[in-house]
Amino acid sequence: MVYNYPEKESWRVYHMKLLLYASTTQPPWKKIQEYVKKRVSYKNLELYQTIEALKQRLCQPKEEMFVGFLLVSDREGLLDILSLRQLFLDIPTILIIPDKEKETIALAHRFRPNFLGFKDDEPEKISQVLEKMLG
């Protein structure tokens, strides 16, 4: 008997889980989000769309290692994320911010992410960093 195996999926199984926070699904945020979701197994992906849901998850016991992937759509959202900084101290984090204004970048650096990107960066570039962080 011959078995036909499905072609290899585009996602990989990593040793760490990805906590993906995206407060908006508007382009280009949606493009980045979809690009990431195609590369990470649904078993390793947790998606949060509100800061309250993300905070609640971060306050739960951590049974696995995480990488945080935060898509912040505006300065108010960045301030919300900054309020959670203490919960991210032991979590490697990618922070994608909406613009390249000095004030926005300064606020983002206060979060101390492992990688700081911008909404107009190529998803491939961000994905390469993510893959290295996920191991």
Image (cartoon, grey):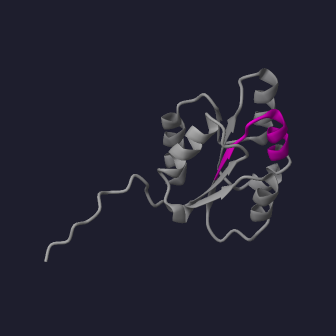
Q: Quadrant of residue 58?
A: bottom right
Front residue of 37/97: it is 37
* Residue 62 picture location, percent across and down: 69, 68
Instruction: Specify the quadrant that holds the N terminus.
Output: bottom left
**Left of 15 or right of it: where is 109?**
right
* Residue 110 picture location, percent across and down: 80, 37
> Is residue 71 found inside the magenta-colored segment of the image?
yes
Q: Which residue extends farthest front?
A: 26
Give the answer, above or below, for where 18 lies relative to 111.
below
* Residue 34 picture location, percent across and down: 54, 46
Residue at (54, 38) in percent of width and height: 126
Residue at (79, 28) in percent of width and height: 104
Front residue of 17/6: it is 6
Q: Quadrant of residue 76?
A: top right
Magenta span of residues: 68-81
Q: How many marks?
A: 0
**Left of 103 or right of it: where is 115?**
left
> Is residue 69 found inside the magenta-colored segment of the image?
yes
Residue at (32, 57) in percent of width and height: 8
Q: Quadrant of residue 31?
A: top right
**Left of 89 or right of it: where is 27?**
left
* Residue 32 picture location, percent across and down: 57, 40
Residue at (74, 71) in percent of width and height: 61
Q: Which residue extends farthest bottom?
A: 1
